[in-house]
Image: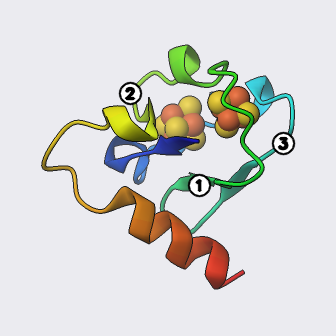
Amino acid sequence: AYVIAQPCADVKDMSCVDECPVDCIYEGGRALYIHPEECVDCGACEPVCPVEAIYFEDDVPAGWGDHRGSNAAFFAAL
Ligand code: SF4
Ligand code: F3S
């Protein structure tokens, strides 16, 4: 799945939401989150983010923290 990483925090541009064909991008308190099971890996959201916050899960820059864990925690709490 694709993931939204830390540049989204407090930016929340929302351009990605309009691009997603399966509506799997959810709004959280400070950032948005991609549902890991609903994402179909189409990649449409990635180029539209103005702060380059979106990556395929294996391509998030090193040292950016546990995005998989924070993603799972977000959806577990819904
Ligand atoms: Fe939605 Fe495609 Fe982005 Fe996944 S990769 S969140 S399906 S736009
Ligand atoms: Fe965030 Fe970029 Fe989407 S800032 S809301 S990931 S377009």
Residue 33 x %, y %: 59, 54
Q: Does residue 74 lie above or below 50 as drawn? A: below
Q: Can you name the residue that lies furthest to the top here?
A: 47
Q: Can you name the residue that lies furthest to the left here?
A: 63
Is the CB atom of the residue marked by disc 2 within 8 angstroms of ligand 2's nearest atom?
yes
Residue at 54% from the left image edge and 22% from the top image edge: 46
Is the CB atom of the residue marked by disc 3 within 8 angstroms of ligand 1's nearest atom?
yes
Residue 51's mark? 2
Mark 1, mark 2: which one is toward the viewer? 1
Image side of residue 68 versus residue 14, left or right: left
**Badge 1: residue crowd in 10 Å (few <14, some 14–19, many ≥20):** many
Q: Are marks 1 and 2 in contact (CB under 8 Å)?
A: no
Q: Are marks 2 and 3 in contact (CB under 8 Å)?
A: no
* Residue nearest the viewer, comparing 58 with 44: 58
User: Considering the numbered disc 1 on the image, is that residue within a helix, a strand or a loop?
Assistant: strand
Residue at 50% from the left image edge and 44% from the top image edge: 3
User: Considering the numbered disc 3 on the image, is that residue within a helix, a strand or a loop?
Assistant: loop
Give the alpha-carbon distance from disc 2 to disc 3, as whole Å.
Answer: 20 Å
Mark 2 vs mark 3: which is more N-terminal? Answer: 3
Identify the residue position indicated by label 3 in the image. Answer: 23
Is residue 13 in view from this perspective? Answer: no
Figure quadrant of residue 50:
top left
Mark 1 vs mark 2: which is more N-terminal? Answer: 1
Identify the residue position indicated by label 1 in the image. Answer: 33
Look at label 1 and name its amino acid: Tyr
Look at label 2 and name its amino acid: Val
